Amino acid sequence: MLHCINAQMESKKFLALFAFALLLAGCVSQAQQENPLPTLQPTQTAVASPTKTIAASTPTIQPTQEFQPTTQPYLNPHRNSPETPSDAEREKLPECGQLKFTEFPVDMNQVYEINPLGNLAPPGHTIPTEHSYLHLNAGGSTQELHELHSPASVFITSISGGPGLTRDPFDYTIYFSLCKNVVGYYNHVKQLSPRMLEAKKTGNCNKNQGSEYEYCEIPLEKFSAGETMGKVGGLQGNFDFGLMDFSKPHVFANPARYGARTPYINCPYEHYEKEKKEKFFSLIKRDDEGQCGFVAQDVAGTLQGNWFYGDARTDSPTGWDASLSFAIDDADPSTQVVSAGGKFTEAGVWEFTPTNAGNINRNFSQATPKNAYCYQSAQRKEKVIVEIVNETSLRIEKQQGECSGTETLQNPIEYNR
């Protein structure tokens, strides 16, 4: 900076010093122009941060530099539903690959029967049920409890439940992730193990308003294969085993009617090696290629599948009595069932052997719009009359007596897909 100093510094000392100060300030300014603050060089890449706002004083990237967005996608830390891990949590889970369940949930010598997916029991299960039932030797006649085990090395995602939900003092549901795409769950757990109670304390827990039912999101607490999770049985005598596989979605006529879980329900026993899978299937009375049952039964353009009254959804208890299903029986695929939650009648089912002609007990998948059909069951003295208006709307009512084939609607209620 000396070349900037005025050579004529022969003045008085005061004036010289004053002039020197002025010139020094000018030199600093000039030096800043000649040597500005460092900027990213052309070989450097600026990485945008999804969580930090760039301050106004941050150097501007020059046009000669290449700007690239982050290669790491934003991982949402919030769950779409309390049971399923968030995007950020899924990144922490192992890849599914060939991962399998390796341990039975209970001592299988104590299980005398398994109901497959798709059980119909209105009003609580008006549409095909999303889990299987394992019936224990207690059979509901005693309060005997059986140890419940982790089916593999898994990560707990949620624990919910509380007192007074069933005849037993307590009742819980446990959700667990095997890997990024597979989440299993046990319903009707009567006691939580000490380790599970500790895991529950780590969760974000909330209670339903006016209820003791508590829902706890658990931050991926790891349980080893075969580790005790709790106990099942009690007065209920059975428990549920369900599973979601996000790599195998199903198609419904109107997906907006369903919660986050339903489109991904699959058979939990398919995730076991052959020997253990065969043990489960040996306890299912149904013996065909669909032995584990089906949840998604909608056939677009026909009567078969689920219908709803008003704006009902499957993931709301208020929608239970507003659901209606025309489904295949879970235990006997040669039987079809009209399953009504309520509204046009009290909750109940009409079971029959379908026909492939006419309009009496016509196969649901062959019943099409602009036609009326009559369904009756040998066990009931009443019939159900259905007029399919179009692909997304029907009118229905219950009448006394047997089907004649000439029925007309008198006071129907409308349901929609």
Image (spheres, rainbow, N blue to C red):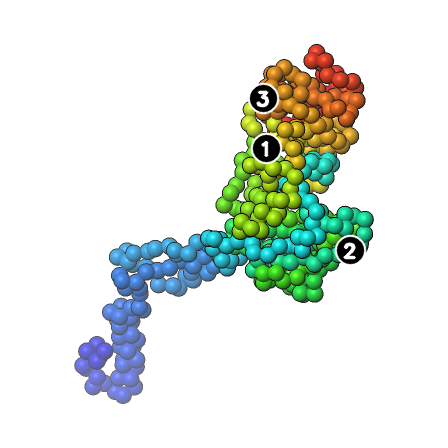
Q: Nearer the viewer, mark 2 or mark 3?
A: 2
Which residue sits at x=76%, y=17%?
A: 402
Can residue 212 be seen by looking at this rendering? no
Which residue sits at x=60%, y=19%?
A: 356
Residue 248 point in image, percent of width and height: 51, 43
Q: Is residue 291 above or below residue 395?
A: below
Q: Which mark is residue 297?
A: 1
Label 2 close to label 3 by CB (< 8 Å): no
User: In the image, what residue type sits under mark 1?
Assistant: Gln
Q: Which mark is residue 366?
A: 3
Mark 2 residue crowding within 10 angstroms, few (<14) / some (14–19) / many (20+): some
Q: Nearer the viewer, mark 1 or mark 2?
A: 2
Residue at numbered disc 2: 144
Q: Nearer the viewer, residue 416 or 397?
A: 397
Mark 3 residue crowding within 10 angstroms, few (<14) / some (14–19) / many (20+): some
Label 1 close to label 2 by CB (< 8 Å): no
User: In the image, what residue type sits under mark 2?
Assistant: Glu
Question: Which one is earlier in the sequence, the residue at label 1 or at label 2?
Answer: 2
Q: Secondary structure at mark 1?
A: loop
Q: Secondary structure at mark 3?
A: helix
